[in-house]
Structure formats: structure tokens, C-alpha cells
Image: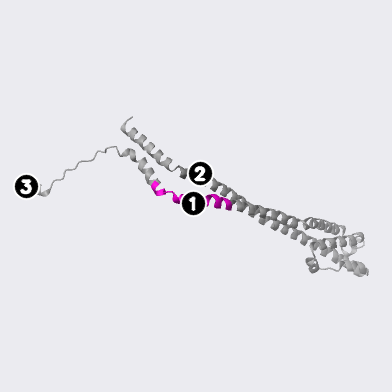
Amino acid sequence: MNKIEYGKLRSMLASALVIANYEILWKDIVIFNETITKIRSLLQKISKLLEGMNSITDGVTSSKENRRDNLTEHLVKVTNLAMTYAIINNDTLLMERLDMNISAYNKMREYDLKVHADEVIGSVKPLVEDMHPYGLVPEDISELEESNRLFSEKIGTPREAIVIRKGKNEEVSRLMKEVDDLYSNILDRLMVRFKTVEVDSFYNNYFDARQSWTSGIRHRREEVSVIDPEQENETE
């Protein structure tokens, strides 16, 4: 082993000793890294849950409103044509059942609108052939039935969405508590311990040890002769 190799070995041993003296710091750093990894994973889950929660009720509400508008449109069409028939034929009972406008439909509760559509279908469908001269055709009744069926499917959905949203809210709260516990029980305590470790001292001791192998090597220096001007004059 030459002098350079011996110097490097001495540096390696000295550096290892410095690191060993700060063993508690490395253990804490491992715990710190594991905790940060857990926190990142939990925060990602929370973010995905929050994104999903916004789309649950929004999507359901939008779909239900579209189906309600479609049902209202078919109701207005059928009742207007059937009302003409009822007035001309002096069918007062039918007129009472059909006496609605779009404003009244918009104010109805969801279930009431569905029930009213059922009543209109039940009253008009048996008379559809008689109403043909007034512009009402079987296809109009079929379209009304279908729009009422589609709307009925959505009546209970928002309540189900609210239940799902509540469950996700509870999951978010649970995950947030888990994150808060990691901060309070681990990271906050580690920060206090990091503060007590002489990081600057470790840094200096480590690099002093790493560079110690060069201290025993002599470097050749250039020799430069300097002549005093007074001595030069005396020589002359």
C-alpha cells in the first residue's frame, strides 16, 4: 500500500467514525423519509376523493334536470293537444286533469311531477284515437311514457349521491386525522431533535475527515529567487 492509498484508507476510517458518532441523525432521517412518503400518499388519496365528490352530485343533478326538462316538454305538448279535444267535447273532468302550464310544472316537486305525468298518460292514452284529428298521435304518448320513465329513475339518485358523498367526507376526515397524527407525533418531534444536533459541526467534521488523506502528501512548490535591490547595487 503506497502513501496515497494509506492516506485514503485513513480518511475512510475517519469519515466512518464521524458518521457513527451521528448515528441518531441517520436513524431520524430514515424515519423522516418514511413519514413524508406516507403523508404524500395520504394527501394524494384526499385529493382524489375531493375531486370525485365534486363530480358525484353535480353529474347526477345535471342529468336529472335534463330529464325533467324533457318530461315537461312532452307533457306540455300532450296536454295542449288533449285540452283542445276536452274543450270542444266539453269534457270537464279531463280539462281539470289537464289544467296545467309549464310554470306549474317547474314548481312541482319531483315525485308530484311524476305522478301527474302518470295521470295524464292514464287519462289521454285511451282517447288517443279520438284525439288524432286534434294532432295527437300514439307516438306522442309513447314519448311521454319514456320521458316519464327516465325521469322516475333519477328521482331517488340525488339522495343516494348524498349518502355516497357523506361517506367520502368521512373518509377524507379520517385520512386528514391520520396525516395530522403523523405531523404531530413524528415530524414535529423530529424537528425538535434535528434542532439539537450540531449540523454545522457534523458537516465540518465530515469533510475534514474526507480531506485528511491529503494532509500527509507533500506538494512540490516552485522555487522563486528574489534578489534585494540593495544587495544588487552592492554587487555592482
What residue is shown with label 3? 234
> In the rendering, which numbered label is found on residue 191?
1
Residue at 46 percent of width and 49 percent of height: 194
Q: Quadrant of residue 235?
A: top left
Q: Which amino acid does the dot numbered 1 rest on?
A: Met
Q: Mark 1 and mark 3: span between their CA atoms? A: 72 Å
Mark 3 near mark 2, Cβ–Cβ under 8 Å?
no
Residue at 86 percent of width and 59 percent of height: 141
> Element at badge 2?
helix
| In the depicted structure, whether residue 58 falls above or below residue 37 | below
Question: Of label 2 and label 1, which has the lower sequence position?
Answer: 2
Q: Which is nearer the eye, 126 or 113?
A: 113
> In the rendering, which numbered label is found on residue 30?
2
Q: Residues within 10 Å of mark 3 (few under 14, many from 20)?
A: few
Membership of 189 in magenta stretch: yes
Q: Which amino acid does the dot numbered 2 rest on?
A: Val
Horizontal and vertical percent position of residue 78 = 85, 63
- The N terminus - image quarter: top left
Membership of 229 in magenta stretch: no
Mark 2 near mark 1, Cβ–Cβ under 8 Å?
no
Q: Residues within 10 Å of mark 1 (few under 14, many from 20)?
A: few
Horizontal and vertical percent position of residue 220 = 24, 38
> Element at badge 1?
helix
Q: Which is nearer the eye, 81 or 13?
A: 13
